[in-house]
Image (spheres, grey):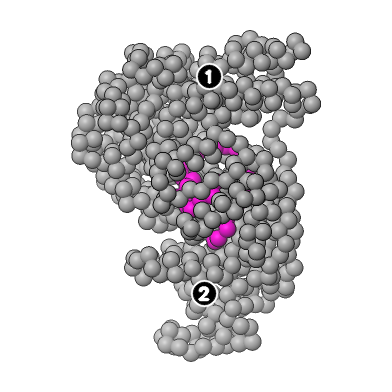
Amino acid sequence: MPPHAQPLPASDDDAFAAELFEPTDGLLLDASADPQEQARQMLKTVYGYDQFRGRQAEVIDSLLAGKSTLAVMPTGMGKSVCFQIPALLFGGLTVVVSPLVALMEDQVMALKLLGIAADSINSSRSREDNVSVWRKVAAGEIRLLYIAPERLMTERMLAALARLPVRLIAIDEAHCISRWGPSFRPDYEGLTRLTDFFPKTPIAALTATADEATREDIAEKLFPRTLAGERDGNVIVSGFDRPNIRLSVQLRNDWKKQLLDFVEARRDQSGIVYCLSRRKTEETAEFLKEHGIKAFAYHAGMDSNIRAAHQALFMRESGTVMVATIAFGMGIDKPDVRYVFHTNLPSNMEAYAQEIGRAGRDGEPSEAMMLYGLDDIRMRRSFIDNEGGDEDHLAREHKRLDALIAYCEAPSCRRQSLLVYFGETIEPCHNCDVCLDPPELKEGTSEALSLIEVAEQTGEIFGAVQLIDILRGLTHEKIKKYGHHKLACHGTGKTTSKEDWRAILRQMVAANFLRLDIQNHGALKLTDKSDQLKKSEIRFSYRTDVMAPSELSRPKRAKSSLPELDNADKDLYEALRAARSDLAREHKVPAYVIFTDKTLADMAIQKPTTRPDFLLIHGVGSSKQRKFADAFIDVIENWLNI
């Protein structure tokens, strides 16, 4: 059973922290229960939840068994709980590696509200503040220490931590460690040395976005191999689907009008608008402001104080729009972002999945809209060619971009196209533009069979360019080198243009009739659907409208997952929201850190009027009960007496 630390000594160094902090270590857990049962008890007592979500329990069990674990879980599925509960059960110190100062501060404050002894050492604080935090760490008063990778991997910090009981190391946004991923950070690469300094300490690596190549790279870098050559760690992938997010893609036509129509129809909602350049970010924010939208700009070239102020306003206020480059978003924990709008094509499928994942973290209906055009594709190609790296790296990045273009041109369910890239298959989602408003399709079974035939005859080791050149009857050096001019299929597709073949092939990849093997230089592989097509069990159709502009219409809203409230309960719900806003201002935290909308809805239905009853509400743990029960019970009692 994981060791338990002694109750933490009280600290009055920081009046605000002292007001919020109540040690969790003193919780009464069943000492006779196994670690898994204790984890469930802690989930209820600290977080107020009755059961784990998705594969949270599996990740926690793996860590409690002392196994380093890579957890790939969709945004909003509670990755933090996966390392926070083991941290509390292990006792000692858990070091949490986090990439952004703002993210650290938000998470530390949220943990303090839960009664968990957490703090951060970061560049936004004075040296005196950081020294004060370190003294608490050294004295055993801190359970979770949040720190940036570049500060952690200094010789001085590593030597100091090596003298402390470091029971667990958690690496948030772990895809940053991999050059395969969409957000590689050189300072993260140094984390590969952690096992040298802490060989017996399990590592929890967590990310929402990692395809198979990226997962393999992360595991290889973080999990040492045993003498037998086996990797000493578990990889747990809980899926990438975010079914509450409606997916839509439109060809960019009059992008300002398209954006304004979309945002104006959602004036009361918070959203993120991504732009490709800093200049476009500022111009777009001003454009929205001119039309009465509460919009803020955010990019890496802005004054850091202005950038931080804009982020704070976005996090704390509803109905705000953040217009940003990709510099904004990593680790953003605002649950009520109702939409993400891309004015340009993202860099690849991983980046796209990561960026749209910032919408609907609360599980409520949300939307992802992307505009794209030929100029985007040309620009993205240029970015890849100019970013440096060897030929293999450039080829892989071009293939990743190809996969995103295939997603944009998907002839069938768009979510299927997105998920198949990550190795996941689902039934049609009925929550994307293609499912809700199917495009006109052209019969393409014979063309698809030709592509399958040429892929098969060439050994499934060549990419799109070679296969299309064979079908079109070309006889360049690479065709002759491999004897492909002698194949029966050589020249059978002369009457179809190169551009049409490329569009058909991309849509076959999007619909999983062919699989793009990015690790193998973009080779095209056959799939189960290839065999079904060959056996005439299914057919293939493709869309010819991929470059034709279409009207931007507002899709039907999906049903909310919040409990149904009658009119009277809605009034109470709004009163509870107002009380939450007052508490959020008082404690200088975003409203959702106090309680989520789902918790308030449950309060409006259950109407607890005693402290024990308050603990039965979804998302209410013991610490928040002690801090906030009286304020909300007063609101409920006043409402009941009206």
Label 2 environment density (alpha carbons within 10 Å; few <14, some 14–19, many ≥20): some
6 relative to 264, above or below? above
Residue linked to disc 1: 624
64 relative to 363, above or below? above
Tell whether 505 sits left or right of 565.
Answer: left
Residue positioned 48% across, 90% down in the render = 475
Residue positioned 31% across, 34% down in the render = 201
Tell whether 182 sits left or right of 228.
Answer: right
- Residue 172 lies within the magenta run: no
Magenta residue span: 322-345
Q: Quadrant of the N terminus?
A: top left
Q: Residue type at mark 2? A: Ala
Q: Nearer the viewer, residue 283 or 127?
A: 283
- Residue 335 lies within the magenta run: yes
Any mark on residue 437, and which?
none
Q: Nearer the viewer, residue 145 or 466?
A: 145
Residue positioned 26% across, 36% down in the render = 198
Q: Nearer the viewer, residue 293 or 115?
A: 293
Tell whether 625 sits left or right of 164.
Answer: right
Residue linked to disc 2: 464
What is the secondary structure assignment of the residue under circle 1?
A: helix
Residue 134 seen by the camera: no
Q: Nearer the viewer, mark 2 or mark 1?
A: 1
Q: Residue type at mark 1? A: Lys
